């Protein structure tokens, strides 16, 4: 089992949320400062941003190993689109850290969208 922080299309109401079917929702969460979102069109990418003061909002889930392997394929880990890393979460998040997907491709020229990816 893995505690996973999701901030984009995997959130409830998001276009890839069905990949979390059967997994356990823990609650809303926010990262520690130092991360922002960029829009890649239909999905966001979270990247490190040292000057950021807000962090990124999302949801905490407990996922099983089979689900995590499927998500790693979906997020293109093998192709180097995202990497899955530990991220520190800010109170009152229900945990102090979790795994999450960080965007790895260059983001210059893309639109920064701040701390929240809107779904629904
Ligand atoms: N899916 C993952 C990373 C970005 C995306 O759209 C997520 O929701 O956390």
Image: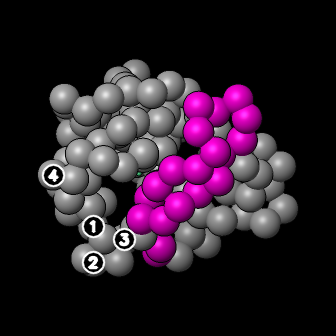
Q: Is mark 1 within 8 Å of ligand 1?
A: no
Q: Report the Cα–Cα distance between label 3 and label 2.
A: 6 Å
Q: Are marks 3 and 2 in contact (CB under 8 Å)?
A: yes
The residue where tag 3 is placed is 81
Q: What's drawn in magenta, residue-wise?
A: 84-105
Residue 33: x %, y % from top left: 76, 51
The mark nearer the N terminus, 2 or 4, is 4
Q: Are marks 1 and 3 in contact (CB under 8 Å)?
A: yes
Q: Nearer the viewer, mark 4 or mark 3?
A: 4
The residue where tag 1 is placed is 76
The residue where tag 2 is placed is 79
Q: Is mark 3 within 8 Å of ligand 1?
A: no
Please give the count of numbered marks on the rendered protein. 4
The mark nearer the N terminus, 4 or 1, is 4
**Left or right of residue 86, residue 12 in this image:** left
Q: Residue at x 65, y 53 (%)?
A: 88
Q: Residues within 10 Å of mark 4 (few under 14, many from 20)?
A: few
Q: Are marks 2 and 1 in contact (CB under 8 Å)?
A: yes
Specify the quadrant that holds the C terminus.
top left
Q: Is residue 38 shown to the viewer in this render?
A: no
The residue where tag 4 is placed is 66
Q: Would you say residue 75 sits in the magenta stretch?
A: no
Q: Residue at x 20, y 59 (%)?
A: 69
Q: Residue at x 53, y 76 (%)?
A: 106
Question: Mark 1 falls on what kind of element?
Answer: loop
Q: Report the Cα–Cα distance between label 4 and label 3.
A: 20 Å
């Amino acid at each position: 089992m893995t505690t996973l922080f999701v901030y984009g299309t995997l959130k409830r109401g998001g276009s890839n949320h069905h990949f979390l079917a059967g997994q356990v929702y823990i609650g809303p969460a926010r990262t520690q400062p130092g991360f922002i979102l960029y829009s890649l069109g239909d999905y966001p990418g979270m990247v490190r941003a040292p000057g950021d003061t807000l962090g990124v909002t999302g949801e905490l889930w407990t996922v099983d190993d089979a689900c995590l392997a499927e998500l790693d394929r979906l997020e293109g880990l093998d192709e180097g689109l995202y990497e899955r890393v530990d991220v520190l979460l800010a109170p009152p998040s229900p945990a102090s850290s979790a795994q999450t997907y960080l965007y790895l491709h260059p983001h210059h020229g893309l639109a920064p969208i701040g701390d929240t990816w809107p779904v629904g």
